[in-house]
Image: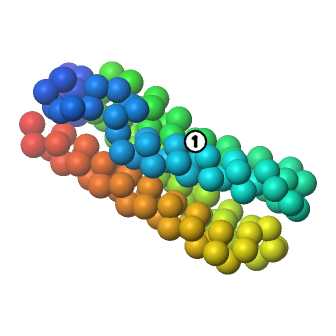
């Protein structure tokens, strides 16, 4: 078994015992709540395609973090973090569309985009950390 495929020890996980302890998951949960709240109002609520797609993409972020954390290896966790980060980019793209068609006020757009960018930055750091840890063994 390669170093990247080895299971993470409790010492390596630090104080993180469960996916709920990860800041990335916590922040993505907040993004989910905001997405669900804003997409449930006005014209956005009636655009079932965009509404459902942005909700699925948002939920995919937190779900992939949780699933990856509970996988058996660092390499698998890394792979799921990469997928979560890609879902975050999908949310950002869909936010632009929601702004362009008038479903979001500029202030709402900015707040959601800031939250999505924060989640993306955290996931990027987590991805780099997981990748570099695997190389150091």
Quadrant that contains the C terminus? top left
Point out residue 128 in the picture as x, y percentages from the top left corner: 26, 52
Which element carries disc 1, helix, strand or loop? Answer: helix
Q: Nearer the viewer, residue 25 or 120?
A: 25
Q: Is residue 127 left or right of residue 29?
A: left
Q: Is residue 110 above or below residue 14?
A: below
Q: Residue at x 74, y 69 (%)?
A: 104
Mark 1, Cα crowd under 10 Å, few <14 / some 14-19 / many 20+, is many
Along the horizontal axis of the image, is 53 left or right of 58?
Answer: right
Q: Where in the figure is residue 15, as x and y percent of width and height?
A: 21, 32
Residue at the image position 81 percent from the left and 56 percent from the top: 41
Q: Is residue 111 above or below residue 90?
A: below
Which is more toward the observer, 90 or 55?
55
**Residue shown at the point (53%, 48%) measured from the top left:** 30
Q: Position of residue 31 (x, y in %)?
A: 55, 51
Which residue lies most toward the left here? Answer: 137
107 vs 132, left or right, is right
Residue at horizontal 45 percent and vertical 32 percent from the top? 66
Q: Is residue 87 visible?
A: no
């Amino acid at each position: 078994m390669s170093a990247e495929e080895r299971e993470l020890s409790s010492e390596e996980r630090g104080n993180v015992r469960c996916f709920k302890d990860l800041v990335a998951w916590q922040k993505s949960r907040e993004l989910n709540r905001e997405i669900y709240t804003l997409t449930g109002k006005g014209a956005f609520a009636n655009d079932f395609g965009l509404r459902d797609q942005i909700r699925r993409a948002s939920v995919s972020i937190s779900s992939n973090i949780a699933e990856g954390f509970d996988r058996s290896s660092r390499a698998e966790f890394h792979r799921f973090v990469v997928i979560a980060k890609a879902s975050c980019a999908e949310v950002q793209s869909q936010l632009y569309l929601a702004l362009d068609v008038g479903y979001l006020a500029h202030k709402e757009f900015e707040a959601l985009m800031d939250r999505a960018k924060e989640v993306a930055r955290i996931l990027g750091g987590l991805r780099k950390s997981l990748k570099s840890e695997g190389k150091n063994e």
